Amino acid sequence: MSQTIRDNLKRMLAPQHVAFVGGRSMARALKRCAEGGYQGQMWLVNPQHDSLEGVPCVRSVAELPCGPDAVFIATNRELTLTCVAELAAVGAGGAICYASGFAETGAEGQALQQQLLEAAGDMALLGPNCYGLLDYLHSSALWPVAHGGKAVEKGVAVLTQSGNFAYNLSMSDRSLPVAYMASVGNQAQLGVAELMDVLLDEPRVTAIGLHLEGLKNVPGFARAAHKALEKGIPIIALKTGVSQIGAELALSHTSSLSGSDALYDALFDRLGVIRVSGPVSFVETLKAAACGNLPAGNSLIALACSGGDAGLIADYSERNELTLPKLDQGQVGELAQVLPTYANLVNPLDFTTAIWGDGEALNRMLDSALRTEADAAMLVLDYPAEFTGERKECDLLLDLYCKALVRHGKTGFVTSAFPELLPPHARERLHGQGVAALQGVEDGLAAWGRIAGYQLNRQALLALGESALVPLCPQALHGEGQLLNEWDSKQALKAFGLPTPNGALSTPASALKDAEKLGYPLVVKAVSAQLPHKTEAGAVALNLKDGAALGAALEKMRSSIAAYAPGVPFDQLLLEPMASPPLAELIVGIKRENDFALALVIGAGGILVELLKDSRSLLLPTTDGAIRQALLSLRSAALLQGFRGREEADLEALVAAIRAVADYACENVAHLLELDVNPLLVGAQGTTAVDALIRLGQA
């Protein structure tokens, strides 16, 4: 994104004047913008009418008094092209293109979208095929239909690839404070990454929510997400379109371990992006971050007026890695003076309904409970129906709770047991005082757990250094590529520092002589790029003790290969010393996801690859610290750490061996299709790669 486009995007995100191009629906959109409180100048451009719906029309873009900061264009695609060029000529800041019929329709539409991009020049362009931009910081609604939001002082930015998702989110009864909502459409020029980068410069944006099918600009996204991590602005992602398609087309085991969705997880983990599973967790997690008052850690002092609610808090806190520190003796003594004898004086605290509506007793309870080292406070409160006349006691408790949080310098939130029993007026009151109003104790504690986890994880991620590295984004390669045989694969990796056995390339005729030089016991393998899976072909023989055993193995191998793959010549052999039994067998591989990432995959290896599917993916480039962390997060990591009295693995040597594979991949990103080292034998004194497969393609 050029600096000029960036500057123009900033104009569009804080417009002093806006224009709408189109017919009656745009006249109504302009009126909605005015009704929403927009204070700047507004124009309606229509060449055929003097006025529409009571709104006077300007006949052409050229007749506008100046280039507007932001324009919504609601014409057909051909007129959109003309309009964008005219707006660029008069110095407009940015245009939103509502029309469809561009790249989403095929080759003809793709060509039109390219023309649109060229017409825009350095003007910021959102869309085409998008619903537009809702800006509740400046009350600018560049949007074709009604919307449910309202002006805010600060709040979250939501970027989505679905206009309908944005529309429905604006209508949801969840009181999410939204600063910006953008439907990105085809992302011809401005996409998720570009918008994130500029939105992070707005101090009133407290968190960013992403609703994605996929990313178009992974390096740009990574740079923006790292910037967010440095600033402490949480990013919450709801990603759809989970797919493992394509894994079965690959030759290597690595691809079956790491589908494209696993690589999104790797990207998000590296950058501290919080991934959620659905719309409700998306909204509640954004609400937990929306006030900007994030907890320092994951401990809670929890308050409820029912033993049942306290039980739910205890269960859901544990599930979401939130801790509930014990009350100290001083707190217990003070609470015993204000609460009835049947109150259970623990955390979570059931303060009972005995003091309900008693402001003095509630304040004493709150002051005792909030005098704690816990990172945050929570209150479970369900409002009864309005007809009961009992809501004023709930309002009193909310008011006292918010004031007590300020007195004690505590971050806090409120949640209801049932989502619908925290009414809008209570949510608005809480958000106005910087207290998150979460709906449903299960969803609420899950949301708070994610935000607390983010805070605990953020500094560790920054210290690890991986988030600052821009991921490689490999382009598609043509054809199936060339498979290197095991010998050539090992030699290529050995040059980058991967330890391999001290073997010899031989032939059936000279095998016995070469074996005498190497010494027994040994392993013999057929060497052929046409036999990627040698075990199935009978092309491997292990633990051969002497020349007789080697001779017999060669005869058996010759006939097995002839039966398995007729026509494959049996002319090259690899002889290697038989390795000692390892502490563990790993697989280390490279997964290429075109236009997305090159990933290092580390997992349980040998014959357990497909059975356990115990693996971790790291996008390249990566760091030694991240490799070590990935190893120790495997379910089978105990095998590396002295399991049942065995020796501990040489982790430094293991990390160095894996780093060699990563370095080879980074150096050869232009041509590397896939790579497997399986198994990598891990010992107490070193690591050895006993098999390797590399496939290279043509750019």
Image (cartoon, grey):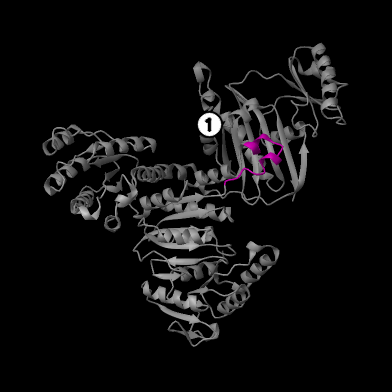
Res. 465 in view: no
Provide residue 580's location: percent of width, then percent of height: 65, 18
Depth order, front residue of 244/425 = 425
Provide residue 133's location: percent of width, then percent of height: 47, 66
For the view shown, which residue lies furthest in the front direction?
387
Provide residue 656's location: percent of width, then percent of height: 59, 33
Instruction: Using the rendered view, name the quadrant where residue 650 is placed.
Output: top right
Is residue 243 rendered magenta in the image?
Answer: yes
Residue sitting at x 44%, y 55%: 208
In screen coordinates, is 524 left or right of 207?
A: right
Depth order, front residue of 342/678 = 342
In screen coordinates, is 35 left or right of 309?
A: right
In screen coordinates, is 68 left or right of 309?
A: right
Q: Secondary structure at mark 1?
A: loop
Is residue 675 rendered magenta in the image?
Answer: no
Q: Residues within 10 Å of mark 1 (few under 14, many from 20)?
A: some
Depth order, front residue of 592/420 = 420
| Residue bearing mark 1 | 634
Provide residue 173's location: percent of width, then percent of height: 37, 57
Q: Amino acid at mark 1?
A: Leu
Count of residue discs: 1
In screen coordinates, is 110 left or right of 280?
A: right
Above or below, comparing residue 386 to residue 80 in the picture? above
Res. 346 in view: yes
Above or below, comparing residue 233 to residue 308 in the picture? below
Instruction: Using the rendered view, name the quadrant where residue 569 is placed.
Output: top right
Above or below, comparing residue 91 to residue 519 in the picture? below
Residue sitting at x 29%, y 35%: 311
Above or below, comparing residue 17 to residue 345 in the picture? below
- Residue range in magenta is 242-256
Q: Quadrant of the N terminus?
A: bottom right
Residue sitting at x 63%, y 62%: 104
